[in-house]
Image (cartoon, rainbow, N blue to C red):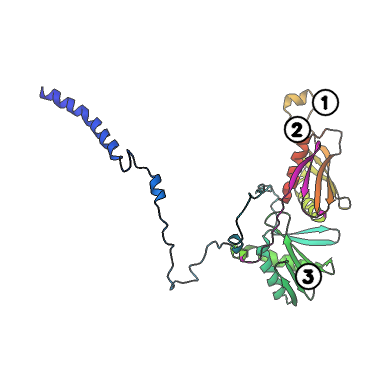
């Protein structure tokens, strides 16, 4: 009889343990601890303060915040989010730190760094070469010397800069050669500390819009700058025969003739190919035309072949090409 009672008592032990664990969760203001109350009652702690006797060379800001980010008023509306970079790692289109651009007799440098990082280098270049600085204006991005005028502005691609060295409106070849060598040698020394310099930036972004049955890209830059950038990157990217190929360029008419396999053609399955006049996927010739529009440039894709170029294919090609400028 006692053994039976002992067995029944043992059966209740797990239930008792479970009940004890459940009741252990009960706390204030009800059956469970509402942690939301902890957040409402939390008070800010005083900031950490390093002692004045610290080694200031050892303890500094790892990522200094630009003053421009903490000044100014309240943001009233959402900012326009720029699309991601199109030229991805491994595409073969990664820009060199310093590259040249040319339209006619005008030549300039494109530097793969923000203007805030390039400006101190221009000042250092002018001083180290003893060019006789007569005027230096960070707000305008201009350094006037006795030999030439150095100018700096944001490039079409985000995070890049354009540097010119001119005299009487003409590019100075020797100055550009020296600048290219000087900036290229200092590419590894660019750091976040240069954010303290004056920062020139572009405010506008590219706009893709539809005009009737056609698409076009509105680029808020002058046509010479746009043509130079597209000429550089089309030569690099449109080099795959049968898929995308740069056939001809015209700086006078601001046009490019390309051979391109459209998205519609690439998407044809084997059955569609068998029952079509073309026994294989075919590319077609398309003109990429630039047109000035005040202080803007319009980019269009114009069919130059007998094959059809629908609106979706037109937009896909324009998005690819305009991606060089982002």
- Which of 198 and 27 lies nearest the eye of the viewer? 27
In the picture, measured across the screen, residue 84 lies left or right of residue 214, that is left
What is the distance, in whole Å, between disc 3 and disc 2 at their CAs?
Answer: 50 Å
Disc 1 vs disc 3: which is toward the camera?
A: 3
| Quarter location, residue 263 | top right
Q: Is residue 225 magenta?
A: no
Instruction: Name the residue carrying label 2.
Output: 264
Q: Judging from the image, what secondary structure is the residue with disc 2 in?
A: helix
Label 1 crowding class (10 Å Cα cut-off): few <14, some 14-19, many 20+? few
The Cα atoms of the two marked residues, 1 and 3, are separated by 60 Å
Residue 24 shows in this picture = yes
Which residue is identified by label 3?
Answer: 149
Quarter of image, res 16: top left
Few, some or many residues within 10 Å of mark 2 (<14, 14–19, 20+): few
Q: Position of residue 230 (x, y in %)?
A: 78, 50
- The percent position of residue 75, horizontal first and vertical second, equals 61, 54
Q: Residue at x 79, y 53 (%)?
A: 226
Judging by the rendered image, the residue that carries numbered circle 1 is 277
Q: Nearer the viewer, residue 24 or 264?
A: 24
Q: Which residues are magenta?
A: 196-223
Q: Give the mark, 3 or 2, whose residue is nearer the N terminus.
A: 3
Q: Residue at image x 86%, y 58%?
A: 104
Say whether disc 1 or disc 3 marks the residue closer to the N-terminus.
Answer: 3
Residue 210 on the magenta segment: yes
Q: What percent of the width, then of the height, locates residue 68?
A: 61, 62
Q: Whole-Å distance between the Cαs marked 2 and 1? A: 15 Å
Residue 69 in the image, given as x and y percentages of width and height: 60, 60
Residue 318 shown left or right of residue 70 in the figure? right
Report the front residue among 34 and 142: 34
């Amino acid at each position: 009889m006692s053994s039976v009672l002992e067995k029944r008592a043992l059966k209740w032990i797990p239930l008792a343990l479970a009940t004890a664990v459940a009741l252990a969760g009960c706390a204030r203001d009800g059956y469970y601890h509402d942690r939301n109350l902890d957040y409402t009652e939390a008070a800010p702690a005083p900031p950490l303060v390093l002692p004045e006797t610290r080694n200031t060379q050892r303890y500094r800001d790892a990522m200094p915040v630009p003053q421009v980010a903490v000044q100014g008023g309240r943001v009233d509306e959402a900012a326009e989010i720029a699309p991601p970079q199109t030229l991805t790692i491994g595409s073969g289109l990664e820009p060199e730190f310093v590259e040249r651009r040319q339209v006619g007799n005008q030549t300039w440098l494109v530097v793969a760094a923000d203007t805030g990082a390039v400006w101190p280098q221009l000042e250092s270049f002018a001083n180290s070469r003893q060019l006789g600085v007569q005027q230096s204006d960070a707000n305008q991005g201009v350094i006037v010397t006795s030999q030439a005028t150095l100018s700096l502005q944001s490039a079409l691609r985000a995070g890049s800069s354009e540097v010119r060295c001119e005299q009487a409106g003409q590019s100075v070849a020797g100055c550009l050669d020296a600048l290219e060598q000087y900036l290229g040698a200092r590419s590894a020394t660019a750091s976040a500390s240069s954010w303290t310099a004056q920062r020139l930036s572009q405010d506008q972004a590219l706009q893709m819009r539809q005009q009737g049955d056609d698409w076009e890209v509105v680029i808020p830059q002058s046509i010479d700058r746009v043509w130079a950038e597209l000429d550089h990157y089309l030569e690099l990217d449109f080099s795959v025969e049968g898929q995308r190929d740069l056939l001809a360029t015209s700086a006078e008419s601001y046009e490019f003739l390309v051979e391109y396999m459209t998205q519609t053609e690439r998407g044809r399955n084997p059955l569609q190919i068998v029952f079509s006049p073309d026994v294989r996927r075919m590319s077609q010739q398309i003109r990429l035309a630039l047109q000035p529009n005040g202080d803007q440039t319009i980019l269009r894709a114009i069919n130059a072949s007998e094959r059809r170029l629908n609106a979706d294919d037109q937009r896909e090609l324009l998005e690819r090409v305009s991606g060089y400028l982002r």
